[in-house]
Amino acid sequence: MAIKEVKSKGKTAAPRAGGASKDEQIGFHKGALSTLAKEREEMLKILTIVEQLMQMHVAALKELGVDLERIAKQAAAKSGKSAPLEKQLR
């Protein structure tokens, strides 16, 4: 994703107590956004891997004859709302 610069109207922020200039503050915030964007990308990679692993386990359970949809429907009917899959399998 691209990082957009936001221009504010009116007065600029005064230097912080540490004496950081406006350019230093801008650099700090841009660096923080860059780091956080990379962290988000890594988190998405991890999430993708976890999702793939979960799908593999679901497929294995289906091969073993476990009907997860039926279990989920029974649990939803019993509680009135859908319970997390982890609780349904216990």
Image: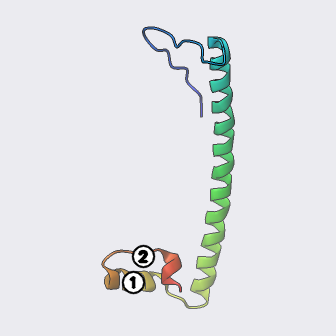
Determine whether 10 is above or below 48 in the image: above
41 is higher (above) or lower (below) than 69: above
| Disc 1 residue crowd, few under 14, some 14–19, many 20+, Cα 10 Å | some
Q: Nearer the viewer, residue 59 or 6?
A: 6
Residue 75 in picture, x, y percent from top left: 39, 83
Q: Is residue 88 left or right of residue 43?
A: left
Residue at 62 percent across and 12 percent down: it is 22
- Three-letter code for the amino acid on which mark 1 is drawn: Ala
Between the C-alphas of marks 1 and 2, the distance is 7 Å
Instruction: State left or right for residue 6 relative to residue 36.
Output: left
Residue drawn 30% across and 78% down?
Answer: 80
| Among the two numbered marks 1 and 2 on one chain, the one whose residue lies closer to the N terminus | 1
Q: Position of residue 66 (x, y in %)?
A: 54, 89
Label 1 with label 2: CB-CB less than 8 Å: yes
- Could you tell me which secondary element the residue under label 1 belongs to? helix
Residue at image coords 67%, 24%:
28
Q: Is residue 40 rendered to the left or right of residue 90?
A: right
* Tag 1 residue: 75
Which three-letter amino acid code belongs to the residue tagged 2? Ala
Q: Is residue 81 left or right of residue 36?
A: left
Q: Residue furthest front?
A: 17
Name the quadrant containing residue 63: bottom right
Q: Which mark is residue 83?
A: 2
Residue displayed at 61% across by 64% down: 51
Which quadrant of the rendered structure holds the N terminus? top right
In the image, residue 17 above or below residue 10: below
Q: Quadrant of residue 82?
A: bottom left
* Image position of 47 with respect to 80: above or below: above
